[in-house]
Image (tube, rainbow, N blue to C red):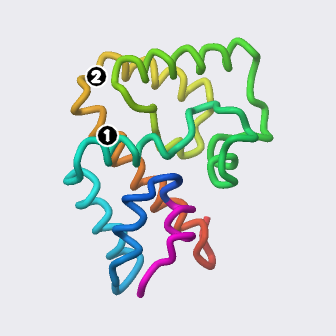
Amino acid sequence: MRASAEMLEALFEKAPRFVARLAAREFDSWDELLANAERMAPAMAEDEQIELINGHPRIGADPGSVSAMSFREQGYGLDAGPAELQERLDRLNDEYEQRFGFRCVVFVDGRSREVIADWIATRLDADRESERRRALADVIAIARDRLTRAAPGGK
């Protein structure tokens, strides 16, 4: 099977070099594609890793600027919480990006915006290399979840 660039972009957001690599290959299954993506992401050059991470929107980004999948995953349309929570998310995103040089990407997995804000605050003490590896793993976890949801009978 060969996955279309459009489908891969839905899974991985805006990561053109990563998507092109995956779209150019044949896989026996989606599981094989995701396993390959898990191996490929940490082996890429750092600038490509950061492109893959930064393809995802900021946590709490303007709802009009995110993909339909990110919109659902980040809980837009639900109670977003008080303005102070959005201000805190914006401040934490700024601090995170300044410290690490890439966006904070996390597999939200149904957690509230407040819980995610608390989680981001704990990540600010991590070392850059560990945090980059964690973010890449979460990019793949997000893609895996999106694929599961898109499958017949998915979540």
* Residue 60 location, quadrant: top right
Which residue is identified by label 2? 126
Contact between marks 1 and 2 (CB within 8 A): the answer is yes
Residue 39 against residue 124 in the figure, above or below: below
Q: Which mark is residue 134?
A: 1
Residue 102 placed where, x, y %? 40, 31
The residue stretch that appears in magenta: 1-11
Q: Bin the neighbour count of mark 2 within 10 Å (Cα to Cα): few under 14, some 14-19, many 20 and up.
A: few
Left/right placement of residue 109 relative to residue 1 reads right
Please tell me which residue is depicted at 28% across the width and 54% down the height of the picture.
Answer: 41
> Residue drawn 51% across and 77% down?
4
Main SS category, magenta section: helix
Amino acid under disc 1 = Arg
Q: Is residue 4 magenta?
A: yes
Q: Taking 27 as reference, is 143 left or right?
A: right
Up-down relation of residue 81 to residue 40 (above or below): above
Q: Is residue 9 left or right of residue 53?
A: right
Relative image position of residue 7 (x, y in whole percent): 55, 70
Using the numbered discs, state the Cα–Cα distance from disc 1 to disc 2 in whole angstroms.
Answer: 10 Å
What residue sits 78% from the left and 38% below the top? Answer: 78
